[in-house]
Amino acid sequence: MKLCKDIHQHSKYPERILQFGEGNFLRAFVDLIVHTMNEEADFNSGIVVIQPIQNGLIEILNLQDGLYTLYLKGIQDGQVTSEHKVIDCVTRGINPYTDYDQYLKLAENPDLRFVISNTTEAGIFLHKKDRLEDRPQVSFPGKLTALLYRRYKFFNGDKSKGLIFIPCELIEKNGDKLKEIILKFVELWELESEFLQWIIEANIFCNSLVDRIVPGYPRERLEEIYRELGYEDDLVVEAEPFHLWVIEGPDFVKSEFPVDKVGLNVLFVDDITPYRTRKVRILNGAHTSMVPVAYLYGIDTVREAIEDEVVGKFVKDTIFEEIIPTLDLTKEELEAFANSVIDRFKNPFIKHDLMSIALNSMSKFETRVLPSILEYQNREGKLPLKLTFSLAALINFHRGERNGEKIVLSDDAAILEQYASLWKVHDGSSEQLKTIVATILSNEKVWKMDLNQVSGLTDAITTYLTNILELGMKKAIFQVMY
């Protein structure tokens, strides 16, 4: 069968973007956005993709001349949608582990303007053993510092040759963090102070927040896809239609990166914080609060949960009645985002197992759900019923049993050990149950505070937990709902 490059002609663009990462997310998110800007806003920018770790997809990417097929499948405005397109903005890929000279040569390109990355949350870190003379450096920031130093030297410190960095790693203040580590390398490598000033004055480090579910490579449907396309594609990728990119940076970045001209869901803002809070509290918070309730109810996937008459209403009421009232963006903006989240949960093309979200659920609950509980009580003067019920369900979830079957728990070893010891001695008495609740809530290593100090929380969770154990989840949730 033919390849994608045998059927589709590759457009030729100047290489203005350096992209660290060739995985599914960037190809289904950033590269689609660049492709669209090239087609509709005369952005005229090609992407050179750098393989950030030793093993990757660069060889396959180059064999396909940078071309690949993207499927967008999901629900938009309540309607099932499915479309595909060939992305042609990637000019080539470079593996710095096999061709470091070619990687450094990129620094001499006068057209280069943007650096975009997704090296996972673990990618932006300070590897103190990295050295300028390494070929290549181990860490992503180390490789970047070496590239910047070559660019600084080649252009004799010309400030017009600085770059705009838009990292997509899912860590808070990702741009600030990347800049901080690069400046630390300048110090560790004892490079000249003029270079340090060039980094600070000539380069822009934007913080950004990305949001799109990318299931990735549809291995189980490949033969069907190849027949539909009429060619083979080893880099075909699937994603949901929803996308959001929030970029915090100076106004001129928006004019140089003209996403607003093509109607994409990309926002340039002065402060990314409320958007990050919105995503974490509504999308991630709904996921995390849903899991113990829905799973103990007898449901296994997100889609089944949101479509269930009782659990679906529980999740929606939790979002609209208990999470949204704790946030500071406009009600219209928050409700629009929440409705898009519900559509995403219903995506018939994505099988999102609840147990995959349950990984490290205690720490997730602390960051994603607990702030909503505390802020709701602060604003309303009472506890949010459903979020509090979810915490009780989480404690019951860690008994490790659903309808007589064992739940394979995956969490911090110390947390699992604490739960196991507490539930092992549970004698069925209300006093013992309250001791279990109080002990869990007092774990300041998890919660960053003693939750027994939150007015009414210990008693409320004890009551809910008693109902779950004595009545079962289906009757217990009904009492909370109606």
Image (cartoon, rainbow, N blue to C red):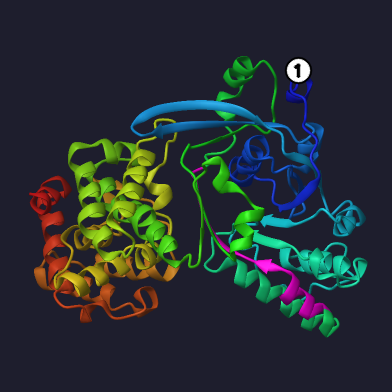
Residue type (three-letter) at the residue carrying disc 1 = Lys
Q: What residue appears at the point 57 percent right and 27 percent down from the top-left corner? A: 84
Q: Along the line of sight, which residue is nearer the eye, 204 or 58? A: 204
Q: What residue appears at the point 69 percent right and 30 percent down from the top-left corner? A: 234
Question: Residue 359: x percent and y percent?
Answer: 43, 55
Q: What residue appears at the point 15 percent right and 45 percent down from the top-left corner? A: 474
User: Residue tagged by mark 1?
Assistant: 2
Question: Residue 453: x percent and y percent?
Answer: 21, 82
Question: Residue 57: x percent and y percent?
Answer: 74, 42
Q: In this view, does 268 lie to the left or right of 181?
A: left
Q: Along the line of sight, which residue is nearer the eye, 286 or 6? A: 6
- 196 inside magenta stretch: yes
Q: Is residue 269 left or right of residue 437?
A: right
- 421 inside magenta stretch: no
Whether residue 50 is visible, yes or no, is: no
Which quadrant: the N terminus? top right
Mark 1 neighbour class, 10 Å CA radius: few under 14, some 14 to 19, many 20 or more: few
Question: Residue 384: x percent and y percent?
Answer: 18, 63
Count of number-bearing discs: 1
Q: What residue appears at the point 67 percent right and 54 percent down from the top-left corner? A: 256
The secondary element bearing badge 1 is classed as loop
Q: Along the line of sight, which residue is nearer the eye, 361 or 157? A: 157
Q: What's the magenta region?
A: 195-213
